[in-house]
Amino acid sequence: MASPRRPGESGPEERPEEGGEAAIAAHWREEGPLPPPEGLRRTANVRDRALWDRFARAGFPDAFREFGDLLDWIRPFRQVFDGSRPPFYRWFVGGELNASANCLDRHLATRGDRVAIRFVPESERAEDRILTYRALHARVNELAALLREEAGVLAGDRVTLHLPMTPELPITMLACARLGAVHSVVFAGFSAEACGHRIADSGSRVLVTMDGFWRRGRWVDHRAIAHRASEVAAREGRSLERLLVWTREPEAPRPGGPTGPVPELHLAEALVRFRGTTVEPVPMPSEAPLFLMYTSGTTGRPKGAQHGTAGYLAYAAATTRLVLDVHPDDVYWGLADIGWITGHTYIVYGPLTLGATTILYEGIPDYPDADRPWRIAERLGVDVLYTSPTAIRQLRKEAPDAPLRHRLRFRVLGTVGEPIEPEAWRWYFDAVGGGRAAVVDTWWQTETGGILCSTVPALDPMKPGSAGPPLPGIDLAVLDEHGAPIARGSGRAGNLVVRAPWPGLMQTIWEDPDRFVATYFARYNRDRASRDWRDWPYFTGDGALEAADGYIRILGRIDDVINVAGHRLGSKEIESACLTVPGVAEAAVVPVLDPVRGRLPEVFVAIAPGAPDPGEVASRVTAAIEREIGKIARPRAVWVIADMPKTRSGKIMRRVLAALANGTDAGDITTLSDPAVVEEIRRRVAAGRSSSGSAPGPGST
Ligand code: WT7
């Protein structure tokens, strides 16, 4: 059962107002193209263009059969695609499979002793933990047995995981998958409130957590959050039945500290009873949901993107091979967090389906110093690295020469999550890759399951600052407001859409099919009754430019979503948090360009007459945001103002606030009910910035 929604939440998403991130996109000159590295032409998984011929438009949908053929089937599928009920598609119809068997069992006979997961703890004094495919299989089986016997988890049940980056996270995901249960991983940096909403929305009876983890050398007590999250969930009508607690140190004693009303089970202790137990992987229909991944949208609450088993897994495996060029004998490192979609697809499911070694790193990239990733990469002989522009900029800023001091052997270097500017791209290519590795700038989204737009390492020339062409089988287009395609090379930006279905596309929003249709398809669908998928272009929410050669440059979100260091946050969620502070009458959140983290949120709050002093309001606003969402949403500045710029009909003009916060031209302000407000805010921001550089000034935090 879903939690009660706040009024108006299930309705159609608000029409994105003009502006958003795309409006403040940094503009850079077209660069390149650079030819693909020589070495890759001989070794890459995909070395010729035949794939493109097979995936030409006439090949739809049958070409995708070869993606399905990458999987191990319990019962083969009879039909590649069923598009009879758009936009709800079914892939590999009639098949049965199990995702954990695809990641584990299929490799046992041939590659059982090969390392599946290599866990690199944050502390350099601690040793790596190595899990071969055989060991990972054993751990997953034991936990699956425990989940079934002790927590009553069955196929179709949802299980929420609030776990940091240790092997227990993929072990728990795969144990759920083995039973056919749907995992919902909540990024460990999200607060108890945020976790509680997700437990309630998904209707999970079981929460899996960990006692704590290491962050910048400090122990983070994580378990306490679980009890608070369970209270939040209970308030929303969903009472947890079981709380399963991993310990960061497997041999650690039962964690101490406060408990709550939900019975706790200490996993390391309880698993002793299941040692050596195996569980048959439950055969699941292709379209059975595999997981939920909550993501921010235009309205106040995150939505559960539901991904299916076969389509998602096939797409994950195929793109890991094609774009990241992972080979079974590779050491692959996805330097992201499994709590986001990047980690699901390209740390866990893609690399494990292919039988490669995937590195799981507990820490953040620049701890204890910005040389750390290169020490790890050299020591482990990493072949392929996949990370974010924020990490690349940070490592470059802190230690630009560090990679040069190591023997690095990268073949492919991937980036994802935000646009990467040519300067940072060049450093990644030259210093990290030594000019020998292919850089792939991969564009995709939580909803798309896997990469949609990128160069293919051995074949496509690279253009710094541009994601590249759509992958084979992906029918991208840039449309204007009325749905007409914008001519390539015209220099005009438009809305990025995908015109044909693909296997990685999410199935729906959990328990809210209407919102799924409204959010992603209503914009360009002309006929709701149409049963032809051609009438249902998928609306990405990104603004983009298509160059004459078909390469796509992503400008960023055109809706109220802000990508903070590659992490997606909803302005409306942050604004709701601000409104919990007494004295705050109105709040508006805007993205501000940041040289390292891409974009950061800044908050404008209008205070009611007689409110407490502005400095205090500002710090309470920050505290409220951390409580409701988590530290990742911490604003760069909180500007306490007397009045918001509004249209005559009373709508807050976020576009104007974004321009003021970014120091750009506010554009046409004649439609404002009181244009004088703009000057006042401009002065306020200027004074705040000059008193403390770009750091927040008085009245801000
Ligand atoms: C949004 C999706 C998909 C994994 C990470 C984020 C932005 C993603 C790129 C890129 C420019 C990018 C888009 C997109 N984005 N990749 N290579 N260049 N922008 O997943 O949290 O669902 O966010 O990230 O704006 O819509 P997400």
Image (cartoon, rainbow, N blue to C red):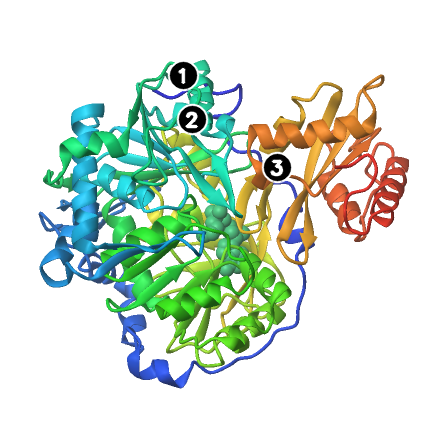
Mark number for residue 211? none
Viewer-nearest residue: 22 or 529: 22
Q: Is residue 500 visible?
A: no
Query: Picture coordinates of residue 406 (x, y %)?
Result: 47, 75
Disc with the residue nearer the chain's start (1 vs 2): 2
**Whole-percent x and y of residue 466?**
54, 68
* Element under disc 3: helix
Nearer to me, 594 or 550: 594
The quarter of the image holding the C terminus is top right
Residue 516 lies left or right of residue 559; in this view the side is left
Residue 227: where, in percent of width, then height? 43, 22
Residue tagged 2: 226
Helix, strand or loop at disc 1? loop
Q: Quadrant of residue 263?
A: top left
Q: Amino acid at mark 1?
A: Gly
Name the foreground residue: 425 vs 405: 405
Disc 2 on helix, strand or loop?
helix
User: Circle 1 sits on which residue?
Assistant: 260
Sequence-earlier tag: 3 or 2? 2
Q: CA distance from mark 1 to mark 2?
A: 9 Å
Q: Is residue 296 above or below residue 371?
A: above
Residue drawn at x 53%, y 51% as measured from the top left: 566
What is the number of the mark on residue 571?
A: 3
Amino acid residing under circle 3: Ser
Q: Badges 1 and 2: C-beta atoms under 8 Å apart?
A: yes
Q: Amino acid at mark 2?
A: Ala
Quadrant of the rendered image containing residue 472: bottom left
The mark lying in front, picked from 3 and 2, is 2
